[in-house]
Structure formats: structure tokens, C-alpha cells
Image: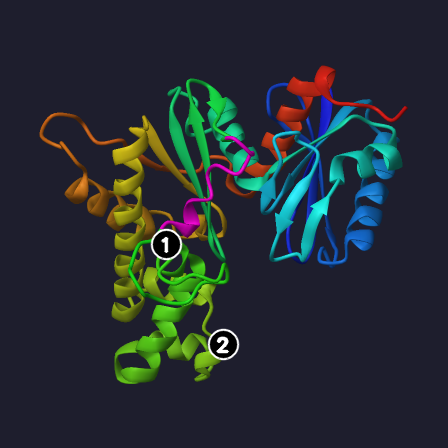
């Protein structure tokens, strides 16, 4: 059996998994790591590889990294949330482990996993949205990742969705991820609780009466229990997601949208209003069927699976140290 190691780098943790050629995770590891400290992150990756190499024969390492990854599939040009700029991550990991390493944008890695083994496996053209703190995007066209001229394609979270809207971490205003993300869910819920606390009784109970304790998990729980404000929050945020998907559908005409990331736990609470808003705003909808909207079938493992499978696929093209 051919095994590759997939690694998904987050802001506070690094997830890894040994993945076989069928996309099955044989063993997974999660380690806390201050990823903003590149040296510490690299050390954690080295420890993970050392531990798993003793149990499996690994052919390659694939890494899903947040931010802008160069088309050389080695260099992270900018990971703003981690404070990385022009980091040659692939070469550093290869030098540390002796294994060929490919680096891909984390949303691209997740999209590849969904295309190969998950909810997008029945179409050659799909858009995978990883919705968490922001919105990541992976574009699959004719069975290949769309990377663009520099490797930066798919940064859909920064589509202008509302002119002069909320300020975004990228420096602009009105970006899609300020309205259709996990951050937006928390923003909407806290605002509602502050303005009309009587209408958010269950949500405030779950938060122990402290608005600042409201997070995405509590909003989801309250919505499942029927809290009207929590349900309204999902309707609002889901509608914004659908509005953005309609714009992407106009440009790219995908065969399907796949919703993943941290908000996937909300399931139908988010998918239903998003799909309805997409259908309502789809151009030429009388002349075509709208793309279906599915939730991920790979849950939180999509990034690890996709990174590993890409590394296995590209192993012959990955440079090894001299």
C-alpha cells in the first residue's frame, strides 16, 4: 500500500494523517503549535514525520498551508494570519525529513480531496468553500485545480460583496468573508444579543449571560434547540453565502458547490438558506439548472487527505535536496 503524509497547518495546531491511495486516513495526529513561529511549526512537523516514519513507509509529504502559495508548490508567499512571507516551506521540510514535499493552499488541498474522494467526486467542475474564521476557496475545473498565473487563484473570501462594508483583515472593506463566515455568525449573534437580549434567551443561557462568550458552537446549539435569533443568524449568514456563490456561478459555471470548514457542523442550518439564495440570484436560471450545494463528506480531514493525495500524485516532480 502506498502511503503519503498529509499535514494541515492551522493557527494554533497542526493536524497530520497517514493517507492511503484510496483517501483513507490510517492514523492521524494533532499537535498544538504556535504556527506564527515558523521555527516552532517546522520543529512540530519534523517530530510528526519522525514518529510516523517509524510505523509507515511514506513516499512523500503534502502540506496544506493558509494563504498565498506559489505555483512552484514549495513557497508560501504570504500567510498573513501566521505572519509568514516568502517562506520556502517545501525545501525546509524536505531538508529536515529527507522526504519529497509539496505545499498547496489549504483550501485547494481540501477541494482536491472532495473531488477525488468526497462530495465533488461525481463532477469535473466544482467550487469548494472552506468556511471558518474566513472563507477559503478551491476551484476544480476539468479535473484540475485552478491555481492562476501566480498560484493565488481561489481567494474568494475577498470578493467585494458590499461596497464600503465591514473592514476586513486584508485592508479592504466589504469582503465576502466578513458577511458569510464563522466570524460573521458570531458578529451577528452578539449584535442581536446586545440589541434585543429578550429574543436571545436560550443563546444567552448557553453563554452564561456573557455576550462575549457567544461563539459559533453555541449559536449552532441554540439554533438546533429552536432559538429564534440563532435561526435568524444562520438565515442571514447563509443568504450572504448564497449571494457570493451566485457571483461565482456567473463566472465559473460549476457543477456543484461544496461547503466545508469549521461551520460544516451547522449542516442544513447553513446549507438550506445558502442554496435558496443561490437559486434566487442565479443568472439565466430559466435556461439552466442551478449547481447543487452539498456539505462536505470528509469533515475536518479534507485538508489532510487532499495534501497527501497531491503529494503522492506529484512525487516524481518534487525536488529533493542535493
Residue sitting at 52 percent across and 30 percent down? Answer: 149
- Callout 1: helix, strand or loop? helix
Q: Which residues are magenta?
A: 149-159
Q: Which quadrant, please, contains the N terminus?
A: top right
Seen in the picture, residue 23 relative to 30 is either above or below; the reply is: above
Left or right position of 309 against 116 = right
Badge 2 or badge 1: first in the primary sequence: 1
Residue 157 is covered by the magenta coloring: yes
Residue 50's tag is: none
- Residue 55 spot, x, y in % from top left: 84, 29
Residue sitting at 82 percent across and 39 percent down? Answer: 92
Who is closer to the viewer here, 209 or 89? 89
Give the dominant element type of the magenta stretch: helix, strand or loop: loop
Residue 213's tag is: 2
Residue at image mark 1:
176
Left or right position of 158 against 245 = right
- Residue 119 spot, x, y in % from top left: 42, 30
Number of marks in the rendered image: 2
Amino acid at each position: 500500500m502506498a502511503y503519503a503524509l498529509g499535514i494541515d497547518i492551522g493557527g494554533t495546531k497542526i493536524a497530520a494523517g497517514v493517507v492511503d491511495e484510496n483517501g483513507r486516513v490510517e492514523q492521524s495526529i494533532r499537535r498544538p503549535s504556535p504556527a506564527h513561529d515558523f521555527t516552532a511549526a517546522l520543529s512540530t512537523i519534523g517530530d510528526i514525520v519522525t514518529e510516523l516514519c517509524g510505523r509507515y513507509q511514506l513516499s512523500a509529504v503534502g502540506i496544506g498551508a493558509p494563504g498565498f502559495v506559489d505555483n512552484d508548490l514549495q513557497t508560501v508567499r504570504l500567510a498573513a494570519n501566521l505572519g509568514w512571507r516568502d517562506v520556502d516551506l517545501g525545501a525546509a521540510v524536505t531538508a529536515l525529513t529527507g522526504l519529497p514535499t509539496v505545499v498547496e493552499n489549504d483550501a485547494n488541498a481540501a477541494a482536491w480531496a472532495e473531488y477525488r474522494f468526497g462530495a465533488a467526486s461525481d463532477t469535473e467542475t466544482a467550487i469548494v468553500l472552506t468556511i471558518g474564521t474566513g472563507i477559503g476557496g478551491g476551484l476544480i475545473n476539468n479535473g484540475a485545480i485552478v491555481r492562476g498565473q501566480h498560484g493565488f487563484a481561489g481567494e474568494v473570501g475577498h470578493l467585494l460583496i458590499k461596497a464600503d462594508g465591514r473592514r476586513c483583515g486584508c485592508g479592504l472593506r466589504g469582503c465576502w468573508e466578513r458577511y458569510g463566515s464563522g466570524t460573521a455568525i458570531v458578529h451577528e449573534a452578539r449584535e442581536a444579543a446586545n440589541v434585543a437580549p429578550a429574543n436571545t434567551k436560550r443563546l444567552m443561557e448557553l453563554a452564561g449571560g456573557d455576550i462575549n462568550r457567544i461563539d459559533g458552537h453555541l449559536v449552532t446549539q441554540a439554533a438546533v434547540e429552536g432559538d429564534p435569533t440563532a435561526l435568524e443568524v444562520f438565515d442571514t449568514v447563509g443568504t450572504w453565502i448564497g449571494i457570493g456563490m451566485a457571483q461565482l456561478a456567473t463566472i465559473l459555471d460549476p457543477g456543484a458547490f461544496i461547503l466545508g470548514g469549521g461551520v460544516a457542523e451547522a449542516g442544513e442550518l447553513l446549507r438550506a438558506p445558502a442554496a435558496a439564495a443561490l437559486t434566487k440570484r442565479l443568472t439565466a436560471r430559466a435556461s439552466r439548472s442551478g449547481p447543487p450545494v452539498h456539505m462536505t463528506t470528509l469533515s475536518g480531514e479534507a485538508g489532510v487527505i487532499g495534501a497527501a493525495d497531491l503529494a503522492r500524485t506529484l512525487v516524481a516532480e518534487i525536488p529533493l535536496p542535493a
